Image (cartoon, rainbow, N blue to C red):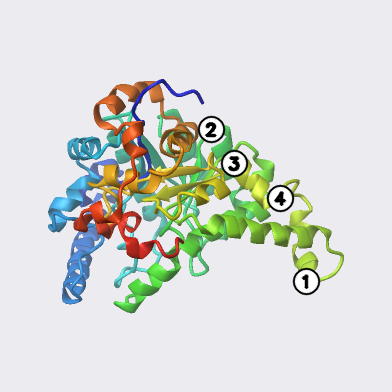
Amino acid sequence: MQLPETDHHIVISADSHCGADLRDYKPYLESKYHADFDEWANFMDEAAEKQTAMFKKAGRAPRNVGIDGDPAVDANKNYSSERRLREQSEDGVVATVLFPNTQPPFAPPAATQFEAPPYSDDMEKRWAGLKAHNRWLLDFVNEAPERRAGVMQIFLGDVEGSVKEIEWAAENGLRGGVLVPGAPPDSPFEPLYSAAYEPIWAAAEANNMTLNHHAGGATPNFGNHFPASLAVFMLEVTWWSQRALWHLMFSGVFERYPTLRWVNTETGTAWVPETLDRLDSFYHRMKYSQYGSESIFGGMAVAGMSLKPSEYWQRQCYVGASFLRPTEAPICREIGIDNVMWGSDYPHIEGSHPFTKDHLRLTFGDLPVEETTKLLTTNACKVYGFDPEALLPLAEQFCPTKEQVATPISYSEIAEEAKGCPGMNPLNQVQAV
């Protein structure tokens, strides 16, 4: 892709989050669900109060409480279009990929269930809630369409309905693509390598919709064993999302759909080279060894794979590298400089906002400008369809120059309050995950 000539980076975040205020989802639901929605919303209010009380008792702030310190104030970042545009512009970011952040109607509270009903309760309403989010998202995207790529949601419990929803999203310009949910062992759904989902993969490729898999969306229920459940969630959350990559590879999805794009977002970066080496090793032993358990158990699966896992990766897979650490920047070459996209994780408290300009200098100061441009702009334009020409006037008004980003900054120059972001905290540089 040829970018316009400019002295400024066109900074695009491949990881941002949004969602409606709790009761603002109601108009996007069919009226037959409104009474049940009111009951669910009251339950969610009570659950939120319990969650906040537990965090306060432990002396910690809930995840979506940022530097303002007020949950109500910070929640506004999810759905205030004016605030998001202002804060992101001030932070030097002119376009974003929008993953969900608030809970859609009839979903349990996030991270741990805190006495929520079982996941299998009334899937019809759960699917209706996801579709309500998609329609709210479309309105939100249309307030700044050149700056926003919305990621729509599907429901594994309704494959046919998910295909229709993908087609609807493509027709209406939700070019962020599809959020592929996980199917952990305690879910009622088939695993992602099941042939049941073939129509979903086919519809995504046919409609040029990227498949996205985000950390946190594939974990099992860790229960309400506070605070241990939260700690175990953090220890395991990225792995549960990473595993979807080999599920699709070894079930032949990338073989059958060679133009399909797959993105793992906010799951770290260092795992990619070592994982691809391991997958290539298994692939080789499964395909070419005449003896051993690998060929016995895996031979039939890899027989239809014409490429090694690392070759599928280079052809059609990407990583959304949220708040990339300085130690991770050189790893991008091992992953593939064309296969990595930077993200700010706005509005989460671990994100780089409002210190993104310093973060970019800290992380990319020693990289060649050409590589930094791919990580901040080119790759996201290719995957999510952003128009760099349309973003150029905004970039020249708000984004840092290429010279500024290429001027290194030391940790001693980073504001103390910025160190809540892993990408700006020296304690988090020992081992990137």
**Left/right of residue 28 with respect to residue 313 in the rendered view:** left
Residue 221 visible, this angle:
no
Numbered badge on residue 293:
1
Numbered badge on residue 316:
3
Q: What is the three-letter code of the residue carrying label 2?
A: Asn
Furthest toward the right, the residue is 290
Q: Residues within 10 Å of mark 1 (few under 14, many from 20)?
A: few
The image quadrant that residue 293 belongs to is: bottom right
| Percent x, y of residue 54 | 20, 74
Of tags 4 and 1, which is closer to the observer?
A: 4
For the residue pair 226 and 202, the one nearer the viewer reads as: 226
For the residue pair 249 and 201, the one nearer the viewer reads as: 249
Q: Where is 284 relative to 315, above or below?
A: below
- Lower sequence index among marks 3 and 4: 4
Numbered badge on residue 207:
2
Q: Residues within 10 Å of mark 4 (few under 14, many from 20)?
A: some
| Percent x, y of residue 282 | 71, 62
Of tags 1 and 2, which is closer to the observer?
A: 1
- Lower sequence index among marks 3 and 2: 2
Q: What is the three-letter code of the residue carrying label 4?
A: Lys
Residue 157 visible, this angle:
yes
Q: Name the residue rendered at 67%, 46% in the picture.
A: 311
In space, the residues marked 3 and 2 are separated at their CA atoms by 16 Å
- Lower sequence index among marks 1 and 2: 2
